[in-house]
Image (cartoon, helix red, strand yellow):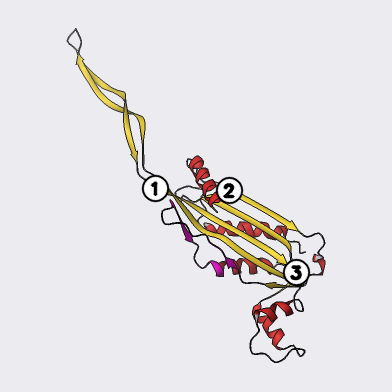
Amino acid sequence: MLRKLLILLIVTSFLILLCTTASAKNSSWKDPAFNFGKVKTIFIEEPQFSYTTLSENSKYTFTKYPDSREKIIRMLEERLQKKKQIRTVTTSYIEEQIKGDPQLPLLETVSPDLFTQELAKHVDLILEITVNDFGWYRDYVEAYDTTETQTERVKYGGVTPEGKKYSGWIEVPKTVTVHHSGYYNVNDCAELKISLKDPVTQKVVWNYTDERYRDSRSWTDGYDKTGPESMMNRILDEAFKKLPLS
């Protein structure tokens, strides 16, 4: 995360004069031995969030995107609904199946170990999501002074040897010191890891990681006001393009 913050600071410093800047980095992997053609049912785990806490003396601040859990779930559901041949189930469904299994004793609650043990009877894959960033990074730029050349209009006039008066205006260059107050660069950010895991072996058979940043100075014409949510939507769009399920 420290490396990521340093990269973000360097990129912001170099590109501050541009209207809107963005960066993206992603990777994907698939297990060639797994038969994705047999997949009919997928268990959707609760999204996990893993934000990094910045130190109090850091020049960075981070603000989480509001209602991030609900928004991530909604984004996932919208895309999974388009996979008509795939059925998605949640924790409550699996627990009901386990409690109703005639081969198991009557249960009021399902322990985590039993849940994991019985999961392969009901689903073909487990979908896991970890969100590492979803919000706004702010890095502080210290106040500074610059020397600039400005022009000043100066009136001139006089009398010619013939006694005729004349006057006018000229622009005279002068050097001035301009003070720039400190400010924060604001960056939309989103980082996500999405994986498919075999419920039998508990091994990952496909994963996709993506991290994206964008200078979110709202005074620019090209700024997307949906901010971090638009970044996360782009990540999930790309992830589902690579998802090995027809």
Residue drawn at the location 68% of the way across and 81% of the way down:
93
Mark 2 lies on a secondary structure that is: strand
Mark 1 lies on a secondary structure that is: strand
Which amino acid does the dot numbered 3 rest on? Asp
Between 12 and 80, the one nearer to me in the picture: 12
Circles 3 and 2: CB distance less than 8 Å?
no
> Within 10 Å of the Cα at label 3, are there few (<14), some (14-19), or many (20+) other Cα atoms?
some
Location of residue 154 in the rendering, given as x and y in whole percent from the top left corner: 26, 24
Which amino acid does the dot numbered 2 rest on? Ser
Mark pair 3, 1: CA separation: 48 Å
Tag 1 or tag 3, which sits nearer the N-term? 1
Residue 63 lies in the magenta stretch: yes
* Viewer-nearest of discs 3 and 1: 3
Q: Quadrant of the N terminus?
A: bottom right
Mark 3 lies on a secondary structure that is: loop
Q: Which residue is mark 1?
A: 183
Tag 1 or tag 2, which sits nearer the N-term? 2
Q: Which residue is mark 3?
A: 198
Which amino acid does the dot numbered 1 rest on? Tyr
Give the numbered dot on residue 23: 2
Mark pair 2, 1: CA separation: 22 Å
**For the magenta stretch, what is the residue range?**
45-70
Total label count?
3
Relative placement, left or right, of 8 versus 194 is: left
